[in-house]
Amino acid sequence: MITGASSGIGEAAARLFAAQGAAVVLMARRKDRLHSLAEEIEATGGRALVTAGDVTTAGDVERAVVAAVGTFGRLDAAFNNAGWGSMGTPLHETDDAVFEQIMDVNVRGVWNCLKQQVPVMLGQGAGAIVNTCSTAGSFATGAIAPYVAAKHAVLGLTRAAAAEYGERGIRVNALMVGSTRTELLETAIERTPGLEQAATARAIQHRLADPVEVARTAAWLCSDQASFITGAGVPVDGGCSAV
Ligand SMILES: NC(=O)c1ccc[n+]([C@@H]2O[C@H](COP(=O)([O-])OP(=O)(O)OC[C@H]3O[C@@H](n4cnc5c(N)ncnc54)[C@H](O)[C@@H]3O)[C@@H](O)[C@H]2O)c1
């Protein structure tokens, strides 16, 4: 199950997971884009199910998990990736509505997913969950304050869930993602001159990530190759957090 599968990192993950043999359940709000992606995956021999919905609505997430289990029989892995943020507004000038939206999508979204996915995985005695966090989950990156706070919370939820369910076969990890060339960032780059340079200046590799580079790490963490990794915030940031 991949949330935020209609673009960026989630879309790249859907293609990659399917190419690696997973039956993928695609969730996001933009139904048309999800259907085109599912058709593309099926045309190359993959299996994909679309369950359009909003991660901030518990009922939508429940429908996605029920559909996943109903269609494919189990839920081996979940990539809770939907998120939203922005930059450029100081804390005291940020609208309360923006604070609420950012908390809702990033924190409540992951919360809703964990609440629905964990019981299924407990029933199976196995499962792997990866939550998309950010370098903003470790330090103030320049994104707006509610996003920095929300991504710190995503790391907290990841660690708490890993600790609670580790003995029962469920691994939970977070991806500490650096600046990645997706719609989220492209929109901000178009609006803010010099942003791309600023976003890549700190990283050792001085470039934006391609979404598939993040997706590859998610696929690895979901696989048995990462069997002794849980509760971790794994950096995929071109060395940004090392310096
Ligand atoms: N792009 C970056 O530089 C960057 C850096 C660090 C972390 N991230 C994180 O990566 C994740 C994916 O973002 P992206 O860069 O691929 O951006 P994106 O905008 O291309 O994709 C975000 C996806 O989440 C979906 N989404 C947003 N709100 C939703 C909601 N309420 N319900 C369901 N789906 C929703 C969007 O439709 C889209 O499919 C996010 O959690 C983001 O915070 C991105």
Image: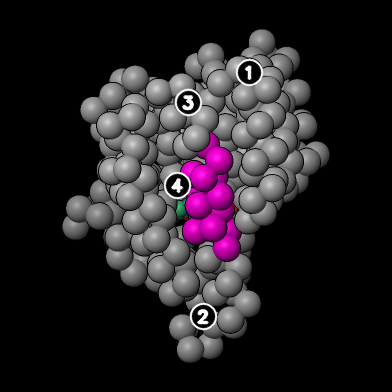
Q: Is residue 49 above or below residue 197?
A: above
Q: Which residue is mark 3?
A: 123
Mark 1 or mark 2, which is nearer to you?
Answer: 1
Residue 96 part of the magenta-drawn span: no
Marking on residue 89: 2
- Left or right placement of residue 219 versus residue 33 in this view: left
Q: For the residue with label 2, is its CB less than 8 Å from the closest atom of ligand 1?
A: no
Mark 2 or mark 4, which is nearer to you?
Answer: 4
Residue sitting farthest toward the top: 45
The quarter of the image holding the C terminus is: bottom left
- Mark 4: which amino acid? Thr
Q: Are marks 2 and 3 in contact (CB under 8 Å)?
A: no
Q: Are marks 1 and 4 in contact (CB under 8 Å)?
A: no
- Mark 1: which amino acid? Phe
Q: Which residue is mark 1?
A: 72
Label 4 Cα crowd, 10 Å radius (few <14 / some 14-19 / many 20+): many
Q: For the residue with label 4, is its CB less than 8 Å from the closest atom of ligand 1?
A: yes
Question: Which residues lie in the magenta part?
Answer: 104-117
Q: Residue at x 56, y 50 (%)?
A: 112
The picture quadrant where one finds residue 218 is: top left
